[in-house]
Image: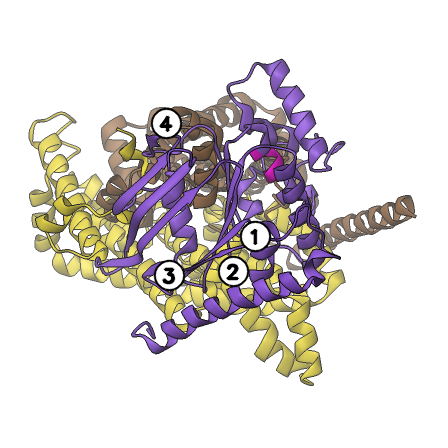
Chain colours: A purple, B yellow, C brown
Amino acid sequence: MSNSILSIRNLRVSIQSRDGSLNEITRDVSLELAPHEFVSIVGPSGSGKTTLLRAASGLRPPNGGTVVFNQMPVTEVPKGLAIVFQEYNKSLFPWLSIFKNVAMGARDCSSHERSERVTKALAQVGLSGFETRYPWELSGGMQQRAALARAMVSDPQILMMDEPFASVDALTRNHLEDVVQKLWDSSTFSALMVTHDVGEAVYLSDRVLVLSARPSTVLAEIKIDLERPRSHFETKQSKRFVELAAEVLEKVEEAGRQSVQGKELI
Amino acid sequence: MNQVRFAPDQSERPLELTRARLTPRQRRTVRQIGGILVALALWELSSATGAVNSNALVTPLATFGGIISHMTALATALVATLEAWALGISVAVVAGILIGTLVGRSQIADAATETIVRMMRPLPSLALIPIAILIAGLGVRMTAGLVSFAAFWPVFINTRVGVRQVDNTVLETAAVLGLKKLNLLYRVVLPSASPMIASGIQVAISLALVVTVSVELVGGTGGLGEFILLAQQGNEPSVMFGGIIMGGLLGWGISRLFAWIIDRFIPWRTQGIRTNA
Amino acid sequence: MISRKQNQTRQRKLSRLAVGWLGLVIVAALWQLLAVTLHTSVFPTFIASLVAAWKVVTSSALRVDIIPSLERTAVGFLISVIIGITAGMIIGHYEVVRDWTSAVVDFMRSLPTPLLVPIAIVIFGINGRMVVATIVSAAIWPILINTANGTSTIEPTMIDTATTYGLRGRTLFWRVVLPAASPQIFAGLRIALSVSLAVMVVAEMLGGGSGIGYFIANAQQSFNIKGSYGGVIVLGCLGWIFDTLFLSFERRLLSWQRGTLGGSFDV
């Protein structure tokens, strides 16, 4: 336990709905994230994955339970934590060039070190030469790579990703997955990703947690024992990958059925 | 300390829950009414203490008295203003949509009107009041004419842009469905452009009211404008304030009514607004 | 290939512009024709009006009326900008303030401002200060409302991102909230500019003592009909110049934003 970098215990999150009543989104979620571990959280849509991530990162306070990062309770977004959001077009600032957007991640460095780091991060994600462009001049996949570069520039101990590839096409998605995998391989950070894409979760992670329907709890935990480095051609066609993906999918569908059977049919 | 940055409506705060079981909407209404009361109190205070020349600024109570004592004259003035306004705005809306659609559907006409629109848009129609008086004399027809001239532009410009910007996918879908000419215009183009047209009309109705009262003030052609001018000349500030308050209520009522109509009949409008912003 | 495509779009733009000016020429010709056929003193020809406009600009009216009008509009607009943006940001940032003020703001912005001119005359007298005060009472609302809307409707993801990278309080405000709201603030400023001009004219007609509005009304009353038309043309040109200058300024400042052309009358 003491060697886990992020520890979420009995997290409970509610949202105040329009008529003033409290709506329980997450009932009880616990999770330990070891150094340099890649964990994905998968769940049916509406299982409060994004809300969970916001509470885990300190963007909003939980209604119960604790989040501990580096032995310190999380009350606001701590240093050493970076987030990549699904909506790259809203998380990159349209009035800043790509260089300045990425430099946002290294605000407390000297200007010399900052530009060095930005250049390196842009090279890592394959965006060298686009420094002076504006976000809207880039394709969706390139924008998301810029957002990844910005996260890398801050040299995070933990990278959180909220459906990072949900807004791009399938080919770009494969490419972005490998960009993330390469970044993770060549560095030491831990990664926590929420997604609804089972294949993507299995492909990237060491462990996959399946959430139940709202109010969510952890329904299942599946260890992914696929060899690294993984590739789209080989890994995704291996028998083990197919088995694991089927196992995760089964759990996700079980969660989905719960929500249909339950009183959640509003 | 850092808690402050979190959005309050997303966190559970027992204090808020025990204080009053109000939904956010109810709480907003209570605050809005509170805001009006505070504004009235500030007005009362500033005029009662004589912070501003008391001859010019009267208390809310005195204003209310002014409204009561001149009830009939005020009602007549309001009706006159509304009449000129309604006449002008109806002509403007009909002409604006009609011509705007024709121009928007034709590339040449669209290009030909571009420069005229650019020049007419920033021209204050209010400057034309003296000329309108010259040409048409004093009267409801002159007022309505100038009002419709001024209010025509926002309706026309927005209709033109709205019609021009109808999504290609929408047009192609309509073509696949076999819609032609008038049917296409009536059932596809105008509904698609309607959010844009609606915001043009929204601008036009308040502009029309401004022009109406301005003509009444400058030309002395009856209505609310003249009513207030006469009250000023007769040195009756409370009556003057009463007229102004009624003018504000009139403008407020008209724009509320129109907002309600839009919500009812063009529910897809908010989408257009969001992409606009 | 690319340069050819660029050439084509450029040509299309040029021909569009040419047709646009042609439209203006046709309207002017129609005006001229109509005026010649009607032959009435209240409707001078286009050319006669242009000549009158030239006379206005070259006469003492430039110093006595046009310059003071420009000054009043500029001062009134600037005061509105300062108060409108400041108040708009406070209202947009704090939901509580927004709730408390919304009804009153809603009322004030629907009030047809020319109705306030008689009071302004009582308070300030017949002078430039009265005109400035009236301009402020009208131009402040589009700025305030757009600023408030712009600051209150920023994408939550944007704020989340900024928070993650350690932007708090004032830095968050200057580096994220303000730039994100600026397109909407500018839209409000543009409306306020044309409102300023319009209200300036009416206020001057009713009691400016001088100024272009006073000039136009005075010309009409003293049966200097061509002068009246000339004044209107001068005012129209001023409005056009203001609008064009404003747009180019906006385009330079908001160059990061695509499609700031804003061809509509949207509030």
Per the image, the residue denoted by label 4 is C169
Say which amino acid is labelled 2.
His
- Estimate the x, y position of residue B25 in percent, counting from the top left: 23, 56
**Circle 4: residue type:** Gly
SS type, badge 4: helix
Q: Return the x and y of residue A127 as percentages of the image width and height.
A: 72, 36
- Residue at mark 3: B85
Residues behind callouts 2 and 3 on a single chain: no
Name which residue lies at 29% across and 49% down. A10
Q: Which residue is mark 1?
A: C264
Tell which tag, 3 or 1, sits nearer the viewer. Answer: 1
Query: Which stretch appears magenta?
Result: A146-151
> Which dot, 2 or 3, sits closer to the camera?
2
Question: What's the residue at 50%, 64% (across, down)?
Answer: B195
Chain ID at mark 3: B
Camera-nearest label, 3 or 4:
4
**Residue designated by label 2:** A196
Q: Is residue C19 magenta?
A: no
